[in-house]
Amino acid sequence: MTGRLAGKVALVTGGASGLGAESARRMAREGAAVVLTDLQADAGQAVADEILAAGGRAAFLPHEVTDEARWIEVVAWTVERFGRIDVLVNSAGVGSGGQPILEATLEGWRRITAINLDGTFLGVRHVAPLMAAAGGGSIINLSSILGKVGLPGATAYCASKGGVLMLTKAAAVELAPLGVRVNSVHPGFIETPMVQNVFREADNGNERRDLIISSHPLGRLGVPREIADAIVFLASDESSFMTGSEVVVDGGYTAV
Ligand SMILES: NC(=O)c1ccc[n+]([C@@H]2O[C@H](COP(=O)([O-])OP(=O)(O)OC[C@H]3O[C@@H](n4cnc5c(N)ncnc54)[C@H](O)[C@@H]3O)[C@@H](O)[C@H]2O)c1
């Protein structure tokens, strides 16, 4: 078996779409066996089938990341089927819904933080012990530039992603002696269904798009491959001295 991730087993949440799907494809191409999970069963199975058709190893499992009992089942199934988990990519997430804080509801806040932050916590909580017992692993948490800087209408999203940033650092420090690395990835605005839906649902979608593009010094939105490449690097032994790092891939958004 060849590739930068040869022999590794990766679990990817949010694997049916966007950054999770592209990370799964690219990790499989580098030799990893990939278990994709998501709420969207048909789309997730289609990504797994695509990987299998290309000669890779993959499987899909339906998974609600806020459901702790389901996490336990997903982890047990993955170990039963592939023997171990070397890489966890916590990519499942939801966008902000564009709710100004003066109109926000506790229900809306809880939904976003439950999926983006609690879901990531549960992944770390249930996969890290296995990695530690096996002598190590790499956990990659999708935060955002909005875990580092604010955006109007995105209070709960920013809070959830800031939480992911600090969950990552605290876990990295605690798990380092056990050989488990934990890093966060902070994408700028990337062309995925999450971002395309924001533009589609806005009254002034084209203007919003232009405004957001102009906030990236590189003058465009990113594409999923540009985030997946960073994730492959963090999953691989090439990043063996990195833990607790904030890997910013944002076309310069936070440099301004
Ligand atoms: N696209 C961007 O510009 C961008 C920027 C910064 C951070 N991110 C983060 O990257 C991650 C992936 O985003 P994306 O752009 O690929 O979005 P996406 O909407 O294309 O994919 C997200 C996936 O998560 C799944 N999901 C949502 N809620 C879930 C739940 N409760 N349980 C299980 N699965 C669930 C969805 O079904 C979907 O397939 C998210 O955490 C997002 O916040 C994205």
Image (cartoon, grey):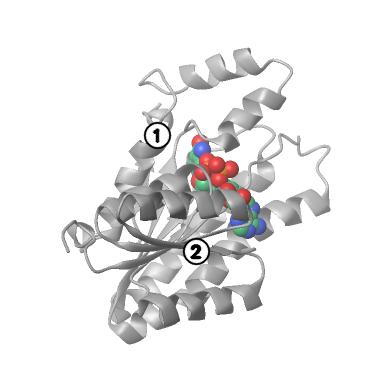
**Residue 136 shown left or right of residue 1 in the figure:** right
| Mark closer to the chain start, 2 or 1 | 2
In this view, 17 is above or below 255: below
Q: Is residue 148 visible?
A: no
In this view, 76 is above or below 90: below
Q: Amino acid at mark 2?
A: Leu
Q: Which mark is residue 167?
A: 2
Tell which of 102 and 35 is nearer to you.
35
In the image, residue 227 lies at what x, y percent?
Answer: 37, 42
In the image, residue 183 lies at what x, y percent?
Answer: 37, 58
Q: Which mark is residue 30?
A: none
Q: Residues within 10 Å of mark 1 (few under 14, many from 20)?
A: many
In the image, residue 222 lies at what x, y percent?
Answer: 41, 30
- Quadrant where the image shows the N terminus: bottom left
Residue holding disc 1 = 250
**Residue 129 shown left or right of residue 195 in the figure:** left
- Residue at figure coordinates x 71%, y 34% from the top left: 98
- Residue at figure coordinates x 19%, y 57% from the top left: 4
Q: Is residue 10 visible?
A: yes
- Quadrant where the image shows the C terminus: top left
- Residue at figure coordinates x 37%, y 30% from the top left: 255
